[in-house]
Image (cartoon, rainbow, N blue to C red):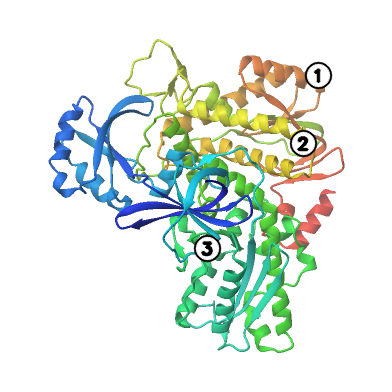
Amino acid sequence: MKERFWLLDLNYEVKEGEPEIWLWGVNEEGSRILVIDRGFQPYFYLLLQEGVDPKTVLEGVEALRSRLHPSTRMEVVERKLFGKPVKAIKIYCQDPDSIPQYANLLSKVEGVKCPLEDDIRYSMRYLIDNDVTPCVWHEVEVEPLRERLNVQADKVYLAKSRPKKIGREEPPKLRVLAFSAIYYSPKGSPKPERSPVVIISTVTSTGEERQIIAENIDGDKVVIEDFIRQVKEFDPDIIVGYGTNRMDWEFLQKRARKMEVKFTVDRVGAEPHRSVYGHISITGRANIDLLDFADELPEVKVKTLENVADYLGVMKVKDRLLIEDVEIAEYWENPEKRPLLAQFSMENAKCVMGIYEALADFAVELSKLVGLPLDQIGRAAVGFRVEWFLIREAYRMKELIPRRVERRYRPYAGGMVLKPKPGIHEDVAVLDFKSMYPNIMIEYNISPDTYLDPSEPEPPQGVNVAPEVGHRFVKAPPGFYKRVLSGLISVRDEIRRRLRKVKPGSVEYRVLDARQKAVKVITNATYGYAGWVGARWYIKPIAEATTAWGRSIILNTIEMARSMGLEVIYSDTDSIFIKYDPEKIKALSKRIKEKIGLEIKPDKIYKRIFFTEAKKRYCGLLPNGELDIVGLEVVRGDWAAIAKNVQEEVLR
């Protein structure tokens, strides 16, 4: 029989020495299902030294056969590494947990340069190799699992084929539980050894609001047990909180342990555990800490729950009750104030649910694009998100994944910022280069596999030479980054074309809009990844060359603008501020496209704009009467409201 399901979470188990992938999802009927896939063998590669005969290395590996599992097998394969053809030995293992040991052992065989891909997690290896993606609908041939498992799922299946993606877009109706906990600590910060959990407030996606309140400070065992019971009864697909990865989950777990309560809130009867990127894993569910996503809102300087909720339009700060952490004990101890503490806790839970609803589409689309599960995508740093996207693309191109190497940070020159002309200026246009750095990387074929070392001769197809730094990149064939970035930009352009034909506010519009934002984030972050010392594909000249071309392009643009009689007031990395003259600007855009090969367009038109003497600090009046403020205190979250209000009134 065939089953269609939307993939929510995955993990792996090893049963009787055999690994199996557990896929948790929701099917078309809304049932929560578990699909168990057996038979996918973990593996890694041994990269051979140049000129070494693979047969010699195979003989060396065979000599160590007694130290390997009997089912271990190997084959010689041809792959690419940084675009260059290489030979490697692919080692298939019985157990994913044996890979580090085997890689260490076999890397010592004569003729082996190093092991590769031994650090790719087994669950991610399964997703990549089988083109299975979190938050996407799949179809799989299954049969009911005969053995009985103690799991919380409506149906449990054994996969008879590998899952295949289907074209369905809209996600299923997911059960979401938002929670907020209050801890009683009259002295200092709460500690699980001595600070009871006095209130847990929850809000569900079905609209149910509930509070669990301790009768006294010795009664938090009941609070924890009731919370566990509620999770099991509601059986959420997603649990959301704010700061929960950093504090709440471990606090509640330690507190439960002190109360001799097993803190089982997952779907297999186990306790939460800390996993990759520091996130808390709750098997079978997606645990999302919204603070991870709030960290990416640069407009919100102080990332408190109430500030983020206010910014996203969930709940205005002025409309809600606020209680400082140091006041919580006082409110709990005073019977007249305790109801206010309960109100504060419930408003927190409502804010958590509201923030989730505002960010959920983006989180889902980012998970789909990158291929990281929903509970990991927020916690993973931008560099890791880009890297997992690149790893998937590299697999399709038969590129081996380089090892991650510890390196010291080495700075390089960034983008060019022209000091502004201070004062007030009338009629100013901002010309912005569309995705400047990604387009530079495409235009000049900047990529790890196109970089030409200074010692290497120039190839017949020629090279692009970066200004100032002199780094060289072959003009052809298209490099890894060029192919990936061109694909991303094409996808985003297609999504935006579809958006223009879809009714705003519809589910399809919402999904497409979130998708194009996710694509934009990964596209623009690829340049930053190139300069990140933790990157697997790190080559410093890539980042240096990209910014060097960026500076050169901005300087050339400024010179062209001035030669056409346009006054340049300011420039910042990928944009210039000039006196507004529609005809001259149109001619300038055309000339830049012809001379440089990049697209520049008016992004904003200001009726009036005020610059301070500092860079990245200005305020402009838009044609609709709105103030556009950048870098000034009025838009900073770490300034007092009175200071912001005074500055805004002065600017107006």
Query: Decide: marks 3, 1 in contact (CB < 8 A)?
Result: no
Which amino acid lies under the numbered mark 2 shown in the image of this protein?
Val
The residue that disc 1 covers is 583
Q: x%, y% of residue 364? A: 61, 48
Please tell me which residue lies in front, 629 or 149.
Answer: 149
Residue at image point 57% right, 70% down: 232
Task: Describe the element under mark 3 as helix, strand or loop.
Answer: helix
Q: CA distance from mark 3 to mark 2?
A: 37 Å
Which mark, residue 502? 2
Instruction: Give the residue displayed 51% in from the left and 64% down from the top.
Output: 267
For the residues carrying marks 1 and 2, which lies nearer the camera in this image?
2
Instruction: Give, as a three-letter code, the residue at label 1.
Output: Glu
The residue identified by callout 3 is 245
Q: Residue at x 53, y 61 (%)?
A: 153
Q: Residue reaching furthest top?
A: 460
Q: Residue at x 57, y 35 (%)?
A: 523
Mark 3, mark 2: which one is toward the viewer?
2
Q: Does residue 540 appear left or right of residue 551 in this picture?
A: left
